Amino acid sequence: MKVYQTNEIKNIALLGSKGSGKTTLAESMLYECGVIKRRGSVDAGNTVCDYFPVEKEYGYSVFSTIFYAEFGGKKLNVIDCPGSDDFVGNAITALNVTDTGVILIDAQYGVEVGTQNIFRTTASIKKPVIFALNQLDGEKADYEHVIEQMREIFGPKITPIQYPLNVGPGFNAMIDVLLMKKYSWGPDGGVPTIEEIPAEEMERSKELHQALVEAAAENDETLMEKFFDQGHLTEDEMREGIRKGLIDRSILPVFCVSALKDMGVRRMMEFLGNVVPFVEDMPAPVDTAGEEVKPDSNGPLSLFMFKTTVEPHIGEVSYFKVMSGTLTPGVDLNNVDRGSKERIAQIFCVCGQIKTQVDKLCAGDIGATVKLKDARTGNTLDEKGCEYKFDFIKYPAPKYQRAIRPVTESDAEKLSEILTRMHEEDPTWEIQQSKELKQTILSGQGEFHLRTLKWRVENNDKLPIIFEEPKIPYRETITKAARADYRHKKQSGGAGQFGEVHLIIEPYYEGMPAPDTYKFGNQEFKMNVRDTQEIPLDWGGKLVVHNCIVGGAIDARFIPAIVKGLMDRMEQGPLTGSYARDVRVCIYDGKMHPVDSNEISFRLAGRNAFSEAFRNANPKILEPVYDVDVMVPADVMGDVMSDLQGRRAIIMGMSSENGFEKISARVPLKEMSSYSTALSSITGGRSSFTMKFSSYELVPSDVQEKLLKAYAESNTED
């Protein structure tokens, strides 16, 4: 295989909603450039890109797949990304290591929520975008409506490069307004017949051609002047103008294809090869030190590991982008993230599961290697003397959680190893060993996302597992001041145990004044603060302890033991055993014994005094509440609103955004357990949502009663 230089390499992400036809388009692209002799199909399970067993089982893409196409003297590295929102992490990774996104839109259904989500991602990281209207041969295809919808959503930058002549099952021809030619195909697609534009289409094609020329000229002052002088641009000048427009996102070209019938695919590939930016045309990535790292083949060697998979008959495969320098086999590199050394024994260019061994990869290229010892997704490997480190991929917060455990308890360690490996393959699978909940919590982007992991663990690793409803990390707090004292006394021969603690507790809030005087019944208690400890709690909130002891009733050396006793109860609140938060304690009196007092005595006395006071301070349970934004089509907005209100949601606002309705609400985490599944069911998969932790709020009294009853019953069973 030819060694491609940096100025001959283009990296492209293939994106779009589920079912838009990306994997089918990838087959046609591979067929057009001669990598495969026969196109596979998703239904037959024999495509280049969907080769993992779980993908064949489910019939849709689960992983991003890298393939390359040698076309027109250029090397196109393409990453075919899953369309489901549940696997959005793959698309985000692909966009960060490529330079252009090709977004497929199903001409039958138009712009879907997933399309908008991925377009927002391209905008946030400033990547060029090309749209391809696919399935123009579908029964419900409507080109004009979709173009109008795209302009409403994405703005006037939408610029058709082509338009179809007969949309629907008879689709077989289109007009290319960049080349000003008519393209038509036989029933099997493939090589087109290229003709002059028919007279009846000339007026429309000239109008669209002029709009394209103007859009291209806008991106270059020299071209703009020439356009004003001559009224037209050459084909090469238009390409240059479009390239510059792509880089600054001032032009969003639209192509027409039928991926299934291989119509329009070759023409789109010509555009990718001739017009879209090369690696070196794009702004250079920035390392963690804030320095730009240009893709210089003569620079220091640095690789960014962006993907790890375990593949059948091969084992672990690590995919990388050459950020700088030129990679050859046998080189030793430093893993700057893990402090280890790696030898790159072999390097490959990949087409799905087909690995082609190569002798060299230049800066900007994408490749793979196998059997690295310690490299993980997101690591940077540098040659000696190079200090680049990259951390530019930011993943969305998880939206779906389940507790996971093996059917056989003795397999817990094996499951932990498998989950660690799965997280390395897909960082949007997050695993947390929760000491608080006493569960292993698996988080992801949706039910399908987690169900895919379960299928793989049970079928590939032969380890049966159970998904359970995760417990909710409730918190406990108090709502009024209370006083208590407790004497711990124990005598069992020899030195005994003695400690007595008197304290007052009250709700804590930031900026509250120092304690002064408290009144309980007819008694008044005046505080004289000698020392204050503010303890930020790992689970949120604070414990503030004031030492108000006067007259040496308790020696200062026992105060830390009392604080330990208080923390014992903060870690296991008396209502439901949940963490307590936001409590202020004044230790104002007590007694000690010259022989029998010790740290354990005062720890126990402090713990029990705190428990009694907590129960008398009108304790309440707090629950985590999340800010939730839901994007829905207008026709199902009422159903989604009703469902949210049934989940104790507080609707904070509604707005219209790019043809969809946006509902903003605050919803208790308890009610979000299976929301992704419910929302998909209500809207037919046409909606999406994001959720972000907001605050802890008091639970309603009826919910608190249920929680107290459930906790009492579980303790009785124990």
Image (cartoon, grey):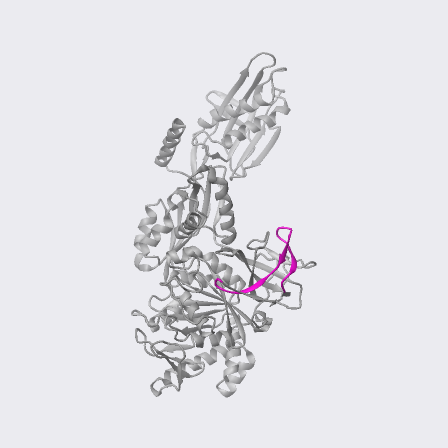
Quarter location, residue 555? top right
Quarter location, residue 536? top right
Q: Position of 675 compared to 484: left or right? A: left
Q: Is residue 71 visible?
A: yes
Q: Which residues are magenta?
A: 328-353
* Residue 499, above or below 641: above
Quarter location, residue 212? bottom left
* Residue 352 in magenta stretch: yes
Kindly give the residue lying farthest to the right in the view shown: 385
Q: Nearer the viewer, residue 455 or 164?
A: 455
Instruction: Locate residue 323, reporting x and y percent.
Output: 60, 63
Q: Is residue 158 visible?
A: no
Looking at the rendered image, the quarter that the C terminus falls into is top left
Q: Position of 207 compared to 285: left or right? A: left
Q: How many marks?
A: 0
Q: Nearer the viewer, residue 530 or 557?
A: 557
Q: Nearer the viewer, residue 67 or 481?
A: 67
Kindly give the residue lying farthest to the top in the view shown: 493
Instruction: Locate residue 425, reporting x and y percent.
Output: 50, 53
Instruction: Locate residue 335, reporting x and y percent.
Output: 63, 54
Q: Nearer the viewer, residue 5 or 209?
A: 5
Instruction: Locate residue 627, reporting x and y percent.
Output: 43, 49
* Residue 419 in magenta stretch: no
Looking at the rendered image, the quarter that the N terminus falls into is bottom right
